[in-house]
Image (tube, rainbow, N blue to C red):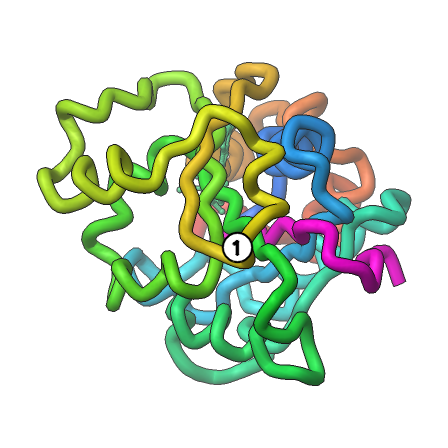
Amino acid sequence: MPDRPDGTPLGIFGGTFDPVHFGHLRLAEEAIEALDLAGVRWIPAGQPALREPPQVAAGQRLAMVRLAIADNSRFSVDAAEIEAARPSFTVPTLQRLRRADQCGRQRPLVLLLGADAFAALSGWHRWQSLFALAHLAVAHRPGFPIEVDRLPPALAESYRERHCADPALLAAVPAGRIVTFAMTQLAISATRIRALLAQGGSVRYLLPEAVIAHIRKENLYREQ
Ligand code: ATP
């Protein structure tokens, strides 16, 4: 079990992962180092609530995440959302993680997001409830500068209220703070990978070889 059972903050990383790529993997790896996390729990979304349905079946996205993280003992996967045949929302997911048989109420949880996802946060269902359940850690992403003055006003206000410069403060309380962290900038997106695969282009070095092998074996992301 990679998650340390103590009160060390645990990273929570949700996404469509359609497919998982090195941008995701570096984000999770660098978050552990930058924020001193015990580990990262990956939570692939079932049917994402706010976007187009993923291109491949839930089971395939889960299989690819499992392959991608298999050799990292600090990563684990939570398959509950992807196995549920309903839209995934982050607040109920975090409420589930807060149950006593999961992480409990006291352990700091740190929701990891790329800057693009953060900028869209105020469109999420019950987004203001997130802060009672987890901290937010926003990773820099090429093309999505974190410009507080350009955020929707309610989100900018939450950011100003909750932002702290020192990630060590995440360990002090279970939830409610926002930090940003710089990661190796990788302009990789699942959208681009899907387009390359549909055209028969090379995706080497954008995602793990084991995931590419799985995509080839299962004939995924081919032009319809
Ligand atoms: P798509 O292109 O299909 O929208 P994506 O590559 O953005 O997919 P998601 O599964 O939607 O991948 O992303 C999950 C999380 O990872 C989001 O918080 C997103 O901001 C973040 N993320 C994805 N790629 C990167 C990247 N290259 N750098 C930083 N963050 C990233």
Magenta segment main secondary structure: loop
The residue positioned 75% from the left and 35% from the top of the image is 208
Residue visible at 62% across and 34% down? 168
Where's residue 185, x and y in %?
54, 15
**Magenta highlight on residue 11:** yes
The furthest residue to the left = 153
Is residue 115 part of the magenta span, yes or no? no
Residue at 64% x, 62% y is 107
Q: Position of residue 124 (x, y in %)?
A: 26, 59
* Residue 206 or residue 119, whichever sits in front: 119
Disc 1 target residue: 14
Which residue is rendered at x = 83% and y = 63% of the image?
A: 5
Question: Up-down: is 167 above or below 74?
Answer: above
The CB of the residue at mark 1 lies under 8 Å from ligand 1: yes
| 102 versus 56 height, above or below | below
* Location of residue 78 with respect to 15 vertically, above or below: below
Q: Write the start and end of the magenta stretch as one range.
A: 1-15
Q: Which amino acid type is marked by label 1? A: Gly
Q: Is label 1 in a helix, a strand or a loop?
A: strand
